[in-house]
């Protein structure tokens, strides 16, 4: 397999929301997770604790999470998830929703369609794999930034090998369900999950595209 350059992987990585059922070979999984382990972290503490689910383990979680979403079970994330975006950040959030729902053909007034789209998050968008990334108590914000770098490194390694990904805050909304399924203690606090596999190019959601703010607006150079 011809791998991409780092620049190519960065430019081609995007959130994919429709996957084929084909599993990624274990040899490839071993490879990408070994590369992700090279991510930087404060004092090299490497605070990430990833749990990869596939096969029967994934199906158990898929069933439990989808049922919670369909029943409207109250979310109980390990970190607050009720924050609101304002100003330009709200505008970017709305644009992302417009692009996604537009690609899926879901109208703003279609509440049932929007609810179904939300539940798809908990179904891993049909992906054959997901990784839930935990952080041990009492680590907090500083270590969470390290885990963000770990997740990006992992997703770029996957992108370079033709593996599609979607980082999902929604997979952190029911940590109790995830911990119970994986047999983990409450001291393992769930940040988010990443669904991954091979892209289903026929899925309408994958036609959605979002932009980025120009460098001149985002970056401030000081001399």
Image (tube, rainbow, N blue to C red):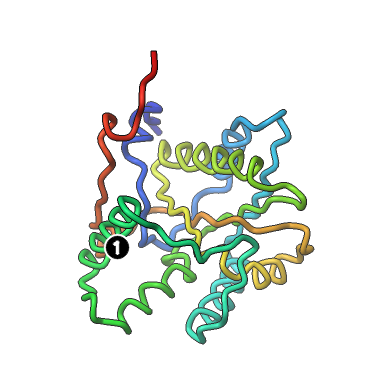
**Where in the figure is residue 119, as x and y percent of width and height?**
43, 75
Q: Give the camera-side residue of 200 and 168.
A: 168
Left/right of residue 82 with respect to residue 115 in the rendered view: right
Left/right of residue 112 with respect to residue 38 in the rendered view: left
Quarter of the rendering occupied by the N terminus: top left
Quarter of the rendering occupied by the C terminus: top left
> Residue drawn at (33%, 76%), measured in percent from left and top?
114
Q: Give the camera-side residue of 56 and 180.
A: 180
> Residue drawn at (77%, 50%), measured in percent from left and top?
138
Furthest-top residue in view?
223
Q: Count up the numbered dots.
A: 1
**Where in the figure is residue 161, as x and y percent of width and height?**
42, 39
Name the residue beneath numbered marker 1: 97
Look at the picture and state if 80 lies above or below 63. Answer: above
> Residue drawn at (43%, 62%), measured in percent from left and top?
84
Q: Give the camera-side residue of 32 and 135.
A: 135
**Disc 1 residue crowd, few under 14, some 14–19, many 20+, Cα 10 Å:** some
Element type at mark 1: helix
Look at the picture and state if 71 lies above or below 212. Answer: below
**Where in the figure is residue 124, as x and y percent of width and height?**
47, 65
Look at the picture and state if 45 lies above or below 89. Answer: above
Q: Give the camera-side residue of 20 and 49.
A: 49
Furthest-bottom residue in view?
71
Splitting the image into 4 quarters, where does residue 127 fall? bottom left
> Residue drawn at (43%, 63%), measured in percent from left and top?
21
Splitting the image into 4 quarters, where does residue 58 fall? bottom right
């Amino acid at each position: 397999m011809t791998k991409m350059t780092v620049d190519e992987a960065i430019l081609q990585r995007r959130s994919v929301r429709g996957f084929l059922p084909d599993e990624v070979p274990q040899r490839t999984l071993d490879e990408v997770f070994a590369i992700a382990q090279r991510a930087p972290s404060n004092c090299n503490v490497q605070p990430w604790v990833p749990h990869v689910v596939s096969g029967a383990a994934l199906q158990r979680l898929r069933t439990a999470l989808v049922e919670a979403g369909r029943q409207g079970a109250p979310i109980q994330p390990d970190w607050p998830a009720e924050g609101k975006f304002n100003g330009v950040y709200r505008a970017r959030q709305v644009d992302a929703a417009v692009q996604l729902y537009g690609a899926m053909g879901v109208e703003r007034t279609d509440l049932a369609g929007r609810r179904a789209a939300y539940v798809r998050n908990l179904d891993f968008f049909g992906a054959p794999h997901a990784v839930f990334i935990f952080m041990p108590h009492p680590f907090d914000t500083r270590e969470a930034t390290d885990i963000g770098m770990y997740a990006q490194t992992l997703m770029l390694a996957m992108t370079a090998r033709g593996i599609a990904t979607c980082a999902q805050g929604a997979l952190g909304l029911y940590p109790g369900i995830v911990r119970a399924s994986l047999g983990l203690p409450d001291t393992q606090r769930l940040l988010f999950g990443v669904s991954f596999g091979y892209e289903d190019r026929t899925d309408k959601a994958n036609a959605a595209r979002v932009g980025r703010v120009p460098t001149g607006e985002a970056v401030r150079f000081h001399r």
